[in-house]
Amino acid sequence: MSSIAIVGAGPGLGAAVARRFGREGHRVALLARDADRLAALAEELAGLGVEARGYPCDVRDPLALAGALERAGDELGTVEILQYSPVPQRDFMRPVLETTHADLLGPVEFSVYGPVAAVQQVLPGMRELGRGTVLLVNGGTAVIPHPDRAGTSVAFAAESAYGHLLHDALAGEGIHVAQLVIPGAIVEGHARKDPAVLADTLWAIHRDRHGFRHYADDLDG
């Protein structure tokens, strides 16, 4: 039995993805900092018949993140699907002329070191399975940098480059790496950016396995 690991699992997109992939029979590993919130979400999913467990960790601590993913694989089955979608902190979004080299440390730890550590942890298991999916979820600054959001603009661009390199390097091994760009906020009731709609989009990306970059909505929308 294999599992999906959702890094950055919360009550919005993470919960929706857990429900969507859980309906397809996947066990769900929920990773985020708040242990109580993870426990509540796992209990909610259990009520829907989805086997889920929380694994508290901070994505800015690569060893803790890798350890949480290792435990998830041991307890829920090999991580076949990795979704990396934590929400960036507000202090990552400073105007470019006010952003120092020190201000970039957090965003880079969050959006580069974190994904690299996560992928390196789950990749051997995916290779053993002979299949896998890595889903990177980013905001619009991954594609169009914003002068008032320098940290995420720089770090998301680096995450995008890493993901694209992985996409090309792993395609021949049956491991699909893709990015979903969500411009603006996730909005309940929105035709394309409602959490449940986005979860369906991510499921389709996993199922259809074509192309690296996908857009949830128009970049100016």
Image: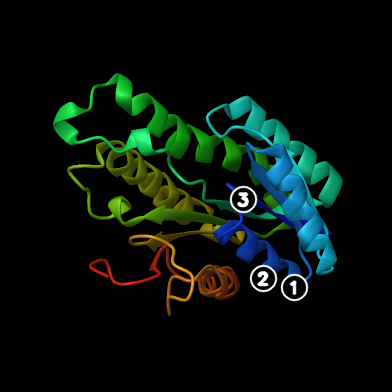
**Residue with the most extreme left position:** 97
Residue 9 marker: 3
Q: Residue at x 53, y 53 (%)?
A: 170
Percent position of residue 9, x then y: 62, 50
Q: Is residue 141 visible?
A: yes
Q: Position of residue 122 (x, y in %)?
A: 66, 44
Q: Is residue 99 left or right of residue 163?
A: left
Q: Earlier in the sequence, mark 1 or mark 3?
A: 3
- Mark 1, residue position: 23
Q: Is residue 128 left or right of residue 117?
A: right
| Marks 2 & 1, CB-CB < 8 Å contact | yes
In the image, residue 60 lies at what x, y percent?
Answer: 52, 29
Residue drawn at x 85%, y 45% as measured from the top left:
75
Q: Measure the C-alpha gap from mark 2 to mark 1.
A: 5 Å
As measured in the structure, the alpha-carbon distance from the residue carrying label 1 to the one carrying label 3 is 17 Å
Point 39% across, 62% down: residue: 182
Q: Residue 24: in sight, yes or no?
A: no
Q: Nearer the viewer, mark 1 or mark 3?
A: 3
Asked if the residue under mark 3 is in contact with the one under mark 1, i.e. CB atoms within 8 Å, the reply is no
Please, what secondary structure does the residue beneath circle 3 have?
loop
Amino acid at pointer 2: Arg
x, y percent for residue 10: 60, 52
Check the image and report above or below for 95 versus 12. Answer: above
User: Going 23% across and 22% down the picture, which residue do you hit?
Assistant: 100
Asked where in the image residue 192 lies, by quadrant, the reply is bottom left
Which amino acid, mark 1?
Arg
**Residue holding disc 2:** 20
**2 and 3 marks in contact (CB < 8 Å):** no
